[in-house]
């Protein structure tokens, strides 16, 4: 079986391209999402109004409020990104609070 030099050369070129592409693709795939990629939740947002969201838990007068509760202690809050599962696509203030608060397990 004879192999033409062109196919060997083509294989080496493809291997070189793959060797450089793999680390770049891996870096893109494992780059974490940062909080700045999310929009900050505003108080005039319909969902925020419905759940009585406030950016400062210390000022809450809601009867459902429990002392010590804030976004940072809620199971729906993701500290790394500031995201909240109740407000998809938005970041919330870790010192904030809403009526959907549930104690982190």
Image (cartoon, rainbow, N blue to C red):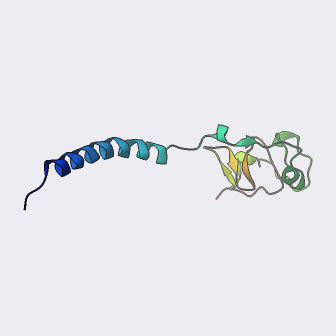
Q: Can you see residue 95? A: yes
Residue at x 70% of width, y 46% of height:
72
Residue at x 66% of width, y 37% of height:
36
Pinpoint residue 6: horizontal percent, then vertical percent.
18, 48
Answer with left or right where residue 99 lies relative to residue 26: right
Pinpoint residue 29: horizontal percent, then vertical percent.
48, 48
Q: Can you see residue 30? A: no
Answer with left or right where residue 3 lies relative to residue 29: left
Pinpoint residue 43: horizontal percent, then vertical percent.
87, 43
Q: To which quarter of the image does residue 55 belong?
A: top right
Image quarter in which the C terminus is found: bottom right
Answer with left or right where residue 4 lies relative to residue 50: left
Residue at x 80% of width, y 57% of height:
100
Q: Nearer the viewer, residue 92 or 36?
A: 36
Residue at the far top in the pictured view: 36
Pinpoint residue 76: horizontal percent, then vertical percent.
69, 55
Residue at the far left in the pictured view: 1
Residue at x 33% of width, y 41% of height:
20
Tally of numbered tags? 0
Q: Nearer the viewer, residue 68 or 34?
A: 34
């Amino acid at each position: 079986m004879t192999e033409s030099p062109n196919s060997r050369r083509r294989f080496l070129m493809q291997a070189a391209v793959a060797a450089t592409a793999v680390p770049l693709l891996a870096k893109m795939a494992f780059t974490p999402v940062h909080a700045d990629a999310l929009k900050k939740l505003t108080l005039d947002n319909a969902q925020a109004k419905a759940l009585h969201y406030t950016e400062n838990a210390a000022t809450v007068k809601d009867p459902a409020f429990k002392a010590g509760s804030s976004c940072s202690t809620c199971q729906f809050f993701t500290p790394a990104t500031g995201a909240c599962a109740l407000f998809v696509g938005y970041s919330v203030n870790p010192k904030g609070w809403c009526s959907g608060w549930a104690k982190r397990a």
